[in-house]
Amino acid sequence: MSATIEEVETQRTEENYLTADYGIWSWFFTTDHKRIGIMYMISITFFFFLGGAAATLMRLELMTPGGDVVQAETYNKLFTLHGVMMIFFFLVPSIPAVLGNFLLPIMIGARDLAFPKINLASWYFYMVGGLFTVWAILAGGVDTGWTFYTPYSTMFSNTSVILAVVGVFINGFSSIFTGLNFLVTVHKMRAPGMTWFRLPLFVWAMYATSIILVLATPVIAVAMFLIILERSFGVGIFNPKLGGDPILFQHLFWFYSHPVVYVMILPGMGVVSEIVACFARRAVFGYKFMAYALLAIAVIGFLVWGHHMFVSGQSMYGSMVFSMLSFLVAIPSAIKIFNWTATIHKGSLSFDTPMLYALGFIGLFTIGGLTGLMLASLAIDVHVHDTYFVVAHFHYIMVGSAVMAYLGGLHFWWPKMTGRMYPEIWGKLSALVVFVGFNLTFFPQFVLGYLGMPRRYYEYPAEFQVLNVMSTAGASILAVGYVLPLIYLVLSLWLGPKVGSNPWNATGLEWQTSSPPPKHNFDVTPVVKEPPYAYSEERNLT
């Protein structure tokens, strides 16, 4: 229903979510999806740099073959801290919790998410889970690795495993609440005329991601709970001496963790689709195929967890099936690459900061995807299993691609979120530095892994030192690339020039409201009358 004249006038006099002065405490009790997205952004930035600090110490240690900086036990705690923070508290929630929370209701013409109080509760669950994990660090750390593999996590480790596991368990509720909220919002709160095939691809990506969050997260929560039961009360679930099966944990863990790989990457695909369409000034090529491919990736992602277990003792026939399914998931992923390329082809391109990040995403994701096909092959996977080849592949997909997309989306929608523009020259520089630093960090690790250097070792043969020094040098460049946006984006809040509602001349409902948006997003409920990405030659000339 359209708002009445009185409601419109009332809304127009309201201040936006950033300038409303109700005191700092009002943020902790807000149900405004935009404020909650901002709180998530601040929180995950903290956890990102905490995990990055651990990675910095690891790379310093690996500059030399011997254990010069830290001892083996400390190194184990560092890569556990790095993995837990980056996976559970940055990569999984980054785009859904920040950009999804902020943008999804506006993109479909809604005033908020379906369950605003549950949305706020999801942030509190996230923070409580994060604090438990930080507590585990302060209590001496955890040395099991981010996978918490049994029986080490249940029988042998003397570190603060339970605190970290409780943190991950609690954090799971945040993911479930967010996914449930997004699903109901997309189904029930779309503006008049916003049919399924008028949804922006970013919304499709959030929808597919939410399916994974709701269906997969309970599995990891159960696995974490079972670790607590066995470690605390001696219940025989994974311990072979008590009739348990340690491989059962791997099945539970990877049944969650492989679909969640796509929780980290599907939102990035949605972000890149929006950016490419805007800066190529063209509708996304094969829009319906792109939407169906997002859903296909979400579904097939539940069927390939066994490719992480080729050397765990599962049957050869099971491994062959998982290998085949792993090749199958490459098809909808390849559709994305080809369709973005077709969208760019003959487009009226402009290489602003978001587009540079999007192009970086496409390049890094292509490398990560092709090496993923190599790992889906049984013969190659057995050779490079538990080597730095796997580390490099994982980081090209999860860190290179996902972080590129997150930073690209942050730069694309930053004027909408804040009403101010960042310095474009610094944005372009940061995109270039991140791309160069990332490739210098992780491409040498493909070579290291193929030559046989195992991951998770703090010492290594001297012949691997040159490649490790290159990787550490790249990590230092990458760190600069990550710090730069933190500095100039924060400074832009005060020094950046103010912008109008649509600085990129983009399509989409989010660009039809003010920057920053008012509390209820729109003065009048919008009515959608055209397909997404309706870029025309007239718009190109404006």
Image: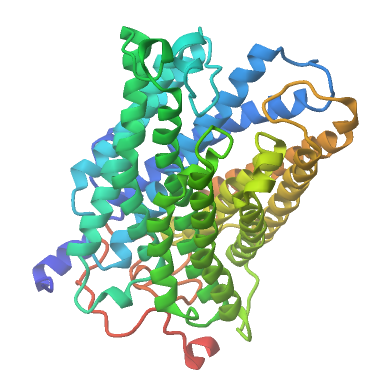
The image quarter containing residue 173 is top left
Q: Residue at x 72, y 14 (%)?
A: 70
**Residue 56 seen in the current view:** yes
- Residue at (65, 58) in percent of width and height: 370
- Judged from this view, the residue extending furthest toward the bottom is 538
Residue 381 appears at what percent x and percent y? 65, 44
| 41 displayed left or right of 531 | right
The x, y position of residue 177, in whole percent, is 26, 43
Name the image quarter holding the N terminus. Answer: bottom left
Residue drawn at 28 percent across, 33 percent down = 25
Q: How many marks?
A: 0
Q: Nearer the viewer, residue 65 or 477?
A: 65
Q: Is residue 14 visible?
A: no
Give the color scheme: rainbow, by chain, secondary structure or one colour.
rainbow
- Residue 434, compared with residue 72, is above or below; it is below
- How far from the left and from the top, in percent, is residue 262? 46, 52
Q: Nearer the viewer, residue 149 or 165?
A: 149
Give the image location of residue 301, x and y in percent. 43, 53
Left or right: where 339 falls relative to 419 = right
Identify whether 28 is placed above or below 258.
above
